[in-house]
Amino acid sequence: MLVKNVTNQTGTREEVIMAVKHIKSNDVEAAASVTDKLSLIDFSAAWCGPCKMLTPVLEKVSDDLDEKVSFYHLDVDESPEASSKFGIRGVPTMIVFHNGEEIDRMVGFRDRNALQTQLESLADSKLV
Amino acid sequence: MDLKTGLVGSGSTESRELDLVIAGGGPAALAAALYAARYDIDHIVLESYQPGGQAALTAVIENYPGIKTITGGDIVTAMKEQAESWGAVFEMASVLSAEPLKDKIQIKADSSTYMARNLIIATGAAPAKLGVPGEEKFYGRGVSYCATCDAPFFRDARVLVVGGGDSAVKEALHLSDFVSELVIVHRRDKFRAEPYLADKLLSCGNCNVMWNTTLKEIKGDESVKGVILNTPEGEKEMKFDGIFMYVGRKPATEPFANLIELNDNGTVRTHNIVHTSRENVFAAGDVTDNDLRQIVTAVSDGARAASAVFDKLQ
């Protein structure tokens, strides 16, 4: 988990645990190669409405599935190499990896229930 | 009932009693939430399906009175902030089922169970699928239902748009700013879109229209490479990098099928605009069978539905 120092609404500094870690193209291989958990990389963009709406869903699901799935966020404009490598032609696209292999790809918004159910099913089939 | 929490029962059977549950997250639900909050109705909004609804996926809105131009994302964000400023309560949850239980509605969501005296269904509609070969396989790999989301991936590409209504033409115009060439196919010989939009598309420099034409198949390998079209002259194979579909909408009414009467196309059967076959269930926005499906009509429906609930509670 990433701990970030932010200013809250009352102006005081506080530490916030960011369950979804921001990565760039160079970090993708390491992020995807985890073996004891699944890795989900959310390919999204700042100009994409559904991507913004997916952010709180990912935060919630990452809290619930912290032990089974690592969550990453990648900005397609900031990291065009990774977007091109994985053939991203729409955002948000969530790719789930295990041990370096793509095991699932979800395109478009998913609500909390749908995303959590899908990830739990993948975790049950891939993690011993 | 626990007076502090409003919870009824114990353990896993606990449910929360409320005067109103609003299901949905688009303009109809947001307007209902604003009015419910201002009427001081004890309520919760379950943002099932897509937060912001289809409106959030619209690139530019130019027909909402009082606002010359705004993005779909910005207008729904403003609506939600306004509703929250009046005390509207939102929860990110999907409605799984809704059943009548005595004089209330039992609403099971993935987060909790609610016993509501009234329900407003404003769950909207999702883009309909055409069901042609290749559509599912290439979704996210060249097939898209959202130009606002995906147009930048098709810079200088050749794209096909399928449809002839407001959404198809509006999104085609948005795409035309990015792509090298755009072809729009429509099964009829003229657009259903409003004339202003249709004229704008017909005069667009990099756009071509194929009338009386339908999409038969999408072809490709790792991504979309082309299509087979049914044209008045017979089948025609053409190369494209992307396919954008706007062929109607599928109402999100499955959880409510045992609760109220639905039409054959899945929309909620309404009378007096927002009333349904059950007196304590109302419907608003794209989920209904009302003719005009616009943000301006959705917010009107939402306001009417919340007002009807307020009147009932008096």
Image: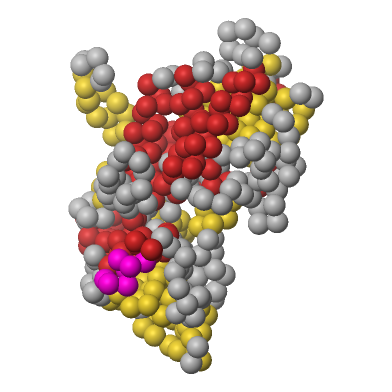
- The quarter of the rendered structure image containing the C terminus of chain B is top right
Q: Which colour scheme is used?
A: secondary structure
Compared across the picture, whether A67 is left or right of A91 comes to right
- Tell me the quarter of the picture where residue A85 sits: bottom left
The one of B173 and B136 positioned closer to us in this rendering? B173
**Magenta stretch: includes residue B199:** yes
Percent position of residue B128, x then y:
54, 60
Front residue of B251/B144: it is B251
Give the residue furthest to the right.
Answer: B102
Residue B108: tell me if it is visible: no
- Residue B293, given in percent of the width and then of the height, sits at 50, 50
Decide if residue A123 is on the left or right side of residue B148: right
Extreme residue toward the top, this view? B3
* Magenta stretch contains residue B95: no
Residue plotted at (51% across, 18% down): B39
Q: Main secondary structure of the magenta part?
A: helix
**The one of B307 and B133 positioned closer to us in this rendering:** B307
Q: Where is residue B214 in the image (x, y as percent from the top left)?
A: 50, 78
Q: Give the range drawn in magenta.
A: B198-204
In-front residue for pair B263/B227: B263
